[in-house]
Image: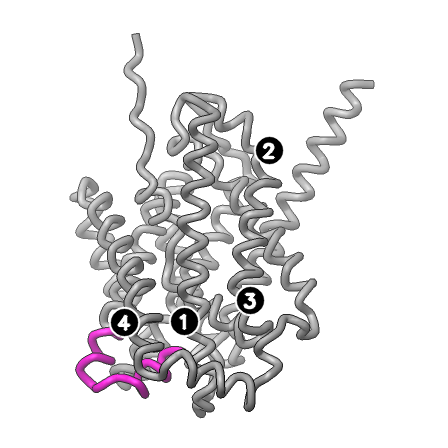
Amino acid sequence: MMKSIKPLSVTYLISNWLSISMIFLISEAVIQYGVFAGFVIVCTFLLAFCAALPFLRPILSNSAPVKNRSWLNWLLLAVWLLEIFILHLLISGVLLHTFFNMHNTVSVFFTVAVILLIITFLSKWRMVIFAVKNIKFILISSLAIFLPTYIYLQKGLESVYHDLLHYHPTILHNEQKGIWMFITIAFLIFFSKFLLQGELLAKYTGPVLHKGIRKLFVAVFIFSTFILAFSTMTVVAITQNLEVSHVNELLVFLIKKLSTPSISHLIGIVLYLSTLLTLVISFFQFEDRLNLRIPQVLMIIAAILAMIIDHFRLTLLTIYSFAGIFISGMVLIFLFHKMSINIKKLK
C-alpha cells in the first residue's frame, strides 16, 4: 500500500507566490490607475482563480498528477523564469543604487555573482531550501505589516487624505484611461499562471478535492491581503512630490526620505535579502521542470536584458505585462486547440 504524501502547507504555497517584485508592480499600478488599484487587482486575482478552477479540477482530483513535459510547457516556464530574473535583477539595481549608492550595472552583476554562489552552496545542501522559503515568507510578511504602518505613522492618515483630496484628486478614483485594458491583461496573466501551477496546487490541495479547493480559497484570500497592504504605501509616496528619475524608484525614495539613515539602510537590506531569496527559490523551483543548465543560462541572459531594459527606462509593469501577454496568449491558443479537438471527437 502506497503511503499518502502529506499536502504542502499554506505557508509553502504563499511563499511561492510572494516576491519583492509584487511590491513594485502594485506600486506602479496605483500610480497609473488610482488609489483603489490594489482592490481592483485583488478582485481580478479572485476572478481569475475562480475561472481557472474548472480547468485545474482534473489535475487537482488526481492524487499523482502527471508532469507535463511538452515543448510548450517548457517554453512558457522558461519565459516565466526569465521574467522573474529580469524583474528582480532590475529591482536589485534600484535598491543598491538608492540605499548604497552602487551603480546599476555593477549592482546587477554583483547580484548575479551572489546568486550563483548561493546556488552553488545550496545545490549540495538541498534540504536547506525549505528553510530558505520560510525565511523569505517571514521577511516579506514582516514588510507587509511593518512598512504600511511605519509610513502612515510618519505622515498620518488624515494628512495623506488631505493632500490627495486637494493636490492629487484624480488618484482617489479609478477612472483613468486604460483601466479596463489593465484589468483584462491582469486577468489573463493570473489565469494563465494559475494553470501553469497546476502541479504545485495539486500538491497543496491533497487527496480530498473539496477540502483542497477550500484550502486554495484560504491561500488566495491570504495572498490578497498582501496585495492590499503593499498598495497602501504608494498613496503616501504620491503626496510627497518626490523627484525621481524613474517611476519604480518612488517607493524606495519615500522610505529613504521618511527614515533615519540607519532605519532606511536596515529596510534596504531586508528588501535586498528578500530579492536574493526570491531569485534563489525561483531558480530551484524551475530547475526540476527545465533542463539542468537552462536556469543558469537564463540568469545570464536576464542580466544582459536587464541592462538593455534599464537603458531604455522601461518600467517593471511594462516588462511584466509583455511577458504575461506572451504566456497567456500561448496558453489560450493551447486551450482553444484542445477544445476544438474535443469538439471534433464528440462529432
Q: Marks 2 and 4, how far apart in space?
A: 41 Å
Q: Would you name the residue on which mark 4 appears?
A: 110
User: Which disc number belongs to residue 268?
Assistant: none
Q: Position of residue 220 (x, y in %)?
A: 45, 46
Q: Which amino acid type corresponds to the residue marked 4 in the rendered image?
A: Phe
Against 127, residue 176 (above or below) is below
The reply to whether dot 1 and dot 2 touch (C-beta < 8 Å) is no
The reply to whether dot 1 and dot 3 touch (C-beta < 8 Å) is no
Quick one: 49 or 344, which is closer to the camera? 49
Residue furthest toward the front?
Answer: 158
The reply to whether dot 4 and dot 3 touch (C-beta < 8 Å) is no
- The reply to whether residue 306 is visible in this rendering is yes
| Magenta-colored segment: predominant secondary structure | helix
The question of residue 260 being in magenta is answered with yes
Task: Tell me which residue sits at (56%, 58%) in the image.
Answer: 323
Q: Quadrant of the N terminus?
A: top left
Q: Would you name the residue on which mark 3 appears?
A: 37
Q: Would you name the residue on which mark 2 appears?
A: 55
Nearer the camera: disc 4 or disc 3: 3
Q: Position of residue 250 (x, y in %)?
A: 43, 81
Task: Tell me which residue sits at (39%, 55%) in the image.
Answer: 297
Q: Residues within 10 Å of mark 4 (few under 14, many from 20)?
A: some
Q: Marks 4 and 1, how far apart in space?
A: 12 Å
Task: Tell me which residue sits at (40%, 60%) in the image.
Answer: 85
User: Which disc number belongs to residue 90?
Assistant: 1
Against 43, residue 54 (above or below) is above
